[in-house]
Amino acid sequence: MKSVGKAQAIMREVKKVIVGKDACVEMIMTAILAGGHILIEDIPGVGKTTMALAFAKAMHLKQNRIQFTPDVLPSDITGFSLYNKATDSFHYQPGAVMCNLLLADEINRTSPKTQSALLEVMEEGNVTVDGVTREVPTPFIVIATENPIGSAGTQMLPESQLDRFMVCISIGYPKPEDEINIIRSRREQNPLETVMPALEEGELMQMQNEVTAVYIHDDVYYYIANLALATRECDMLELGISPRGSMALSRMAQARAYLKGRDFVIPEDVSAVFTNTAVHRVQAGAKAKLNRKSEEDILRQLLEQVPKPSPEKGAL
């Protein structure tokens, strides 16, 4: 728990740029501590890219950004072999994933084969080019953005790739007073220039290792499993969360407990991250659409229906 102050410092730096969205900043910080990837799904202009850039700068990570378009190729992601005439040999040219934080802008605007090029690296932390497997730098985080409104020229992410994002968040419009502060802050300079690194090299890995040591009581494990089961048995959902989703939920709960200064998970940690961890892993069925219920609505309803263990169970 000795590095938890560093996480708070990162969030303070990000909040210099992202005004009035403290819950979103905390959720992304939680996912990063849990060692996961983040999908930001929202309309243009609400700060998706700025959020990712602010986190990269505050964590002092090497970051690459790739703007996805229909002509982006898988080799742009993974890298490729280039022939060197002077040495009569092929040399590996690194792709965009050879960094600590990859900002994948508008990931749904590229082809399915390019989207799938991210699958191996997101799950296993390495890429294979011409039969040679290479590890990406650690830590490795993908923050991807997509616009859920515009459909022209977009390709939906396959369920197998959505499942590899630990959380899906929406930033939303700012409140009027926050919007005024945003406009004022950009009158003379870009607030990103004021963000200072809050970490030294290797400290993020240390924090992620400390998160894995956060204790989870068996009753909390049962609570996680019961929530997963509820999504699978719900008649409003065609697709429930997978065991990978359950594992993501437990890691997110550990990271939230760590961020709150505890070395044990309480049920509130699970319920606080449940919707963002599960919303992109479930699919609403015909009954839900008939009743105009979104995935978020259904998940919040399930949270109310599944009994919580007593709060003190986390400390036992």
Image: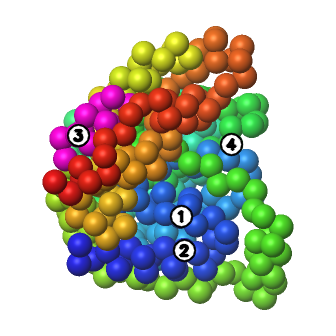
Q: Residue at x 35, y 80 (%)?
A: 5
Between marks 1 and 4 in the image, the one whose residue lies nearer the viewer: 1
| Residue behind mark 4 | 147
Chain-order first, disc 1 or disc 2: 2
Label 3 neighbour load within 10 Å: few <14, some 14-19, many 20+ = some
Chain-order first, disc 4 or disc 2: 2
Residue 189 seen anywhere in this rendered image of the structure: yes
Cα–Cα span, label 3 and label 1:
29 Å
Q: Which stretch appears magenta? A: 217-227
| Residue behind mark 3 | 219
Cα–Cα span, label 1 and label 2:
7 Å
The three-letter amino acid code for the residue at tag 2 is Val
The three-letter amino acid code for the residue at tag 3 is Asp
Cα–Cα span, label 4 and label 2:
22 Å
For residue 199, side relative to residue 191 (left or right)? left
- Residue 14: image tag: 2
| Residue behind mark 1 | 25
Label 2 neighbour load within 10 Å: few <14, some 14-19, many 20+ = many
